[in-house]
Image (cartoon, rainbow, N blue to C red):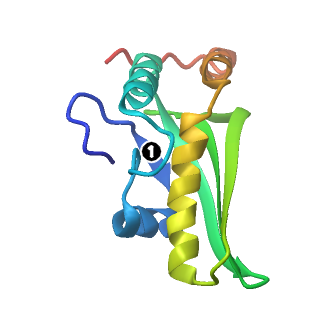
Amino acid sequence: MTAHAECSINTYLAGNVSKAFYAYGALNVPGTSLTNQRYEMICEKLRKADARVNILGMATVLSNRSIGWAILSLKDRTTEIGTSDYANARTMVHEQASQDIADERMVFAINEALATWTELDQAIARLDEVRKSIRVRPVQR
């Protein structure tokens, strides 16, 4: 779900996240700290690990503020086996109360969580441990 031709990060999106992605952009939207270089590095790591990003997000208006948050974890691309160990999360708040702004903040939170996922290597290693514990091998792509 990106404009990058070289590499595409595969994701699993809940309905509300998918709708916001189409409305406000997807991964690597302008205005976030997810640089092209970081995106490509993450994409390559996920490709080699045969993993995809599981995105859980929510957008709401609360106390006259727009709030969007996201939690990212990993899933196997083929088997749906996943782990939330070493997941990463971000919350974004805007002073103006609007569901549209909250949806946009959720998309930004997803991008920021991906950009700042410092324990991605550990998450990939844990996913591999989970696969091995139930005797599932990643598909080499």
**Image: 6 above or below 34:** above
Foreground pick, 29 / 140 = 29
In the displayed structure, does residue 27 sit left or right of residue 8?
right
- Residue 80: where, in percent of width, then height? 53, 39
Q: Residue at point 36% right, 32% down?
A: 36
Q: Is residue 27 visible?
A: yes
Q: Residues within 10 Å of mark 1 (few under 14, many from 20)?
A: some
**Image: 27 above or below 37:** below
Q: Residue at point 63% right, 81% down?
A: 96
Three-letter code, disc 1: Thr
**Image: 97 above or below 122:** below
- Secondary element at image label 1: strand
Q: Is residue 80 visible?
A: no
Q: Residue at point 64% right, 15% down?
A: 125
Q: Quadrant of residue 47?
A: top left
Foreground pick, 123 / 6 = 6
- Residue 38: where, in percent of width, then height? 45, 27
Tell me the residue that label 1 is attached to. Answer: 11
Total numbered circles: 1
In the displayed structure, does residue 7 sit left or right of residue 136?
left
Q: Residue at point 67% right, 75% down?
A: 95
- Residue 71: where, in percent of width, then height? 66, 49
Q: Quadrant of the C terminus?
A: top left
- Residue 77: where, in percent of width, then height? 44, 33
Q: Residue furthest left?
A: 5
